[in-house]
Amino acid sequence: MVSGKQWLQAIYMAGVVFCLYSSLFCFRKAFNVAAFDGYVLFGISYKVVLVITQVMGYMASKFYGIGFIASLKRYGRGQTILLLAGVALASWLLFALLPAPWGFWCLLFSGFPLGMLWGIVFSYVEGRRMTDLISAALAVSFIFGAGLAKSVGTWVMNAGVTDQWMPFATAALFVAPVFLFTRLADRFPAPDAADIAHRTERKPMSRDDRRRLLRQYGTGLFLLIVVYALVTILRELRDSFMADMWRESGEVFSASVFAQTETIITLVLLVIIAGMVLVNDNWKAFSYTHLLLVAGFGACLAATLLYRQHSIDTWWWMLLVGLGLYLVYIPFNSILFDRFIASFAIAGNVGFLIYLADSFGYLGSVAVMMIRNFFAGQVQWLAFFRTLVLVTGAAGVLCSIGSWLYFFKLNSRK
């Protein structure tokens, strides 16, 4: 049984990591709200070049993080967070100082350090009986933080700051919160004996450990990686070009719309994911998570079909597609791999698995953006995204079902 004191401790930890990662997201996503009109680079619009460059930085960090995060030790994590955030802030300053459009490469050096941060922050909370609750707060900070970054970035521009300086100015507002919440996270207690008994001990993984895990569970993990790659592509496009799709729809929107939709999604997902802490059996929780994957893709498909028929407006479509995407995306970044490790008593950590999935997710995102710009450049982002939701949504449902069937067969042999 989990005591009242442990519940309070978990709620406190959840609040700290939520605030920490929401603040870090304002180093990352504010620039997406600016139009960056007036420039073309390499035959592509300046805004698209910036998005692709930053995503390439994320992608590189995820491939590097497969080994780095998997072998991460407990000590020195706070200093590493502050160092990486500092590099990202310096990159935004350099971007602001260089004349447009020649500072685009700075986003590579903001994307790489920022892409490393999730694995470090998650290492504070994994492997606990209350991980579902704490990681739910951490995971939904992606949603809230993205909306917060866009809204703050818009307000900064409305105050007279140029597109070029807005990302640095927005990030600078969150330097003090990042420092404060990093210090608080550094003081979290380690998992206790009861946590280890229920969720297995989380250890750094050597290269041989990682290879052994992939050999043993490769087929199921491959299907999950495909699911994650599909949802990462959709989530990254929605996140990066949400403002552009609003403009293309012709419907009026305000700066607060981003925080509105993302806050609603955050609250709904927080309740759903945190509620998994009540499921004590690890295999049942892992199975229920697969159900969330199917439901999320299904919501995206249904909302997009309704939107194409003009049965709902852009606000509702953005809300419902966002809810569906994060219903798939958030479990990967909170409970799915944690419960997988516990279900099959694997000696390892979540960081390796999520960075493996993330690396291919961002690789797919870069590929899709390049295909859209070089082979479908005249297609608006709104039309392109609607079509992509329908195609990847159907594929995601099939792969999610296939993954569950594979792991169900393995679990039945235990």
Image: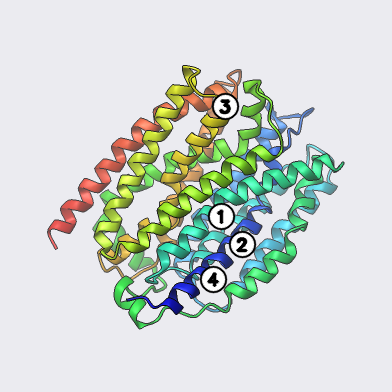
CB-based contact (under 8 Å), mark 2 and mark 1: yes
Secondary structure at badge 2 equals: helix
Q: What residue type is disc 3 on?
A: Thr
Q: Which residue is mark 2?
A: 19
Residue 286 falls in which quadrant of the image?
Answer: bottom left
Mark 1 is surrounded, within 10 Å at the Cα level, by few (under 14), some (14 to 19) or many (20 or more) other residues, namely many
Which residue appears at 56% of the width and 36% of the height? 238
Q: Which residue is mark 1?
A: 141
Secondary structure at badge 1 equals: helix
Which of pointers 1 and 3 indicates the residue nearer the eye? 3
* Residue 314, disc: 3
Q: Which residue is mark 4?
A: 12
Which residue appears at 35% of the width and 46% of the height? 292
Q: What residue type is disc 4 on?
A: Tyr
Disc nearer the start of the sequence (2/3): 2
Mark 2 is surrounded, within 10 Å at the Cα level, by few (under 14), some (14 to 19) or many (20 or more) other residues, namely many
Give left or right: position of 90 versus 210: right
Whole-percent x, y for residue 348 in the image: 36, 69
The answer for how far apart the CA atoms under marks 1 and 4 are is 15 Å
Which residue appears at 37% of the width and 63% of the height? 277
CB-based contact (under 8 Å), mark 1 and mark 3: no
Mark 4 is surrounded, within 10 Å at the Cα level, by few (under 14), some (14 to 19) or many (20 or more) other residues, namely some
